[in-house]
Image (spheres, rainbow, N blue to C red):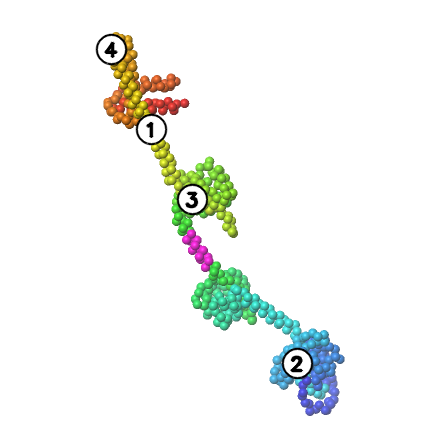
Amino acid sequence: MHQAEASDPHESQKAPVSQQAMWSEEFCSALIGSSSIGIYIVQEGTFKLVSPEFKRICGYSTEELLGKKPSDLIHPKDRENVRSNAIQMLKGLTSEPYEFRILTKDGDIRWIEEKVVPINYEGKRACLGNFLDVTRRKAAEQDLKTAEREVKFIFESLPDPVSISELETGKYLYVNEGFCQVTGYSREEIIGKTPFQLGLYMDPADRERLVSRLKKGGRVHGIEIPYTVKGGGLRYGFLSGKLFQFRGKNCLLAVTKDITPIKEAEKKLRESEQRFKELFNSVSDLIYRQDLEGKFVSVNRAMSEIFGYELDEFIGRKASDFMKPDLRPLFESEYLKAIRTKGHHEGVTAYFAKDGRKIYLEYRSRLIKPPRGTPFISGIARDVTDRILAQREIKKLEKQVLQAQKMEAIGTLAGGVAHDFNNILQAIFGYTQILLMSKSKDDPDVQNLRQIETAAKRASELTQQLLAFSRKVKSELRPVNLNQEVLQVEKLLRRTIPKMIDIELRLADDLQVINADPAQLEQVMMNLCLNARDAMP
């Protein structure tokens, strides 16, 4: 808003009003009245003509504006700039419109875009101004700037790398501080460069695949991409991005989550799992893991080697499946009850291998409740089959030793008794001989004395057997007729075995004479017969 100072040599002369001039004035009046742009004429420093749109923008009436100075409408802080820009435009030094603020009648601030030209008005120099209300546009621009600042603030606040790049070339237009920190490059080194120039992509085909997916779907999510940072270090990222228009070009807005620590942790975990697996399968003890129903989830190789089953044949089966069927229900109930109530269970149990071998395992199971995840049963077992069998053999040997000790004690006692009894028998036998010598052959007592003598001999033989049992005399081997020995034993058995038991002899006629101790042979046959008697119902 500025008054044009232009001279007109014909200013003092009044031109006659022609029909053409009248038509031109009417046309201009109609044009000004219907224009959506505020139009005004300033002459001699005050408004001389204002359009309806101009009045609407300013909020004043025609009467209030006519005679008013333009500077009265301009915001005080913008007056000097408006004056300078208007002079430049009136002198033809610039044709670009300029912007400034005005104060409306209500005190509101509006943004105006203005252009001015010098004219003659009613024979005098004047200034014609175009007055465009750009308040909404300025507000939108301000909102856009605010939004850009907010977005930039958000991007800069994100620790994850954020970038905007041209889709086709890959040239970076914007990167945040997180991008610089992860890659090791400064913004100045990145902006205007492509990832290939920076050497970020290990494989250029990764970028091609990314662009292809973006063109198909418009966005991508969670693509794992390895990339090289400044200095040659290798890192990994999860890239998510979306296509959008930026500065008139198809661009990619990408956010990359740095997962290098996760990848390194995964690598260490795999290495740890491999070491654990090697250890798991190298120990001689049986290691297993079960669910809360007692079903195997995993077992080590020692289980396979001892039972003879493949590893996958254990999965889903219970330990009781390898026991005797009648023991399974009791074991399962006691085992799971102890795990649930006490949190552990130990014991020694017999199992059967695939080939039918009986295996004794000493096991210890414990309930594990991880902070996260499902509880499970972890256990370790050891093959104690050899130990159990050895213990049984030891017990058997202990019984045999105890029996031998008993027999030795009995033998010692029997030897002492037999020795004393033999002395008594010798006296009986001696006195019997004396009596026989004093008797004639026809004496009726001779037969009785012969029976006493025979009984004394038999008793003497028994004492010899007791002495032999006690190892106090050596066995005397001599030719023996087995049939005769059996007949002697029969006579003794008929006196000792109950009458309800029949004794049946089946003697061979052609037996050869053998070399044996008659007393020991008789004792063996007596033992066999007495054992048979005891075994009868």
Q: Which of marks 4 and 1 is nearer the N terminus?
A: 1
Across and down, in percent, residue 24 comes to 71, 83
Against 134, is 502 above or below? above
Q: Is residue 309 magenta?
A: no
Going by the numbered disc 3, the residue's amino acid type is Ala
Circle 1: element type? helix
Across and down, in percent, residue 457 comes to 28, 18
Left or right: residue 263 versus residue 529 is: right
Q: Earlier in the sequence, mark 4 or mark 3?
A: 3
Going by the numbered disc 1, the residue's amino acid type is Ala
Q: Distance between the residues labelled 2 and 1?
A: 138 Å
- The residue at which mark 2 appears reads as 79
Q: What residue lies at 25% left-to-right and 22% top-to-bottom?
A: 480
The circle drawn on residue 516 is none
Q: Closer to the observer: label 2 or label 3?
A: 3
Across and down, in percent, residue 229 comes to 46, 66
- The residue at which mark 3 appears reads as 381
Q: Which of 353 and 366 is in front in this view?
A: 366
- The residue at which mark 1 appears reads as 409
Left or right: residue 178 versus residue 131 is: left
Q: What residue lies at 70% left-to-right and 87% top-to-bottom?
A: 124
Give the class, few, some or many, for how many residues have Cα within 10 Å of label 4's Cα (few <14, many ≥20).
few
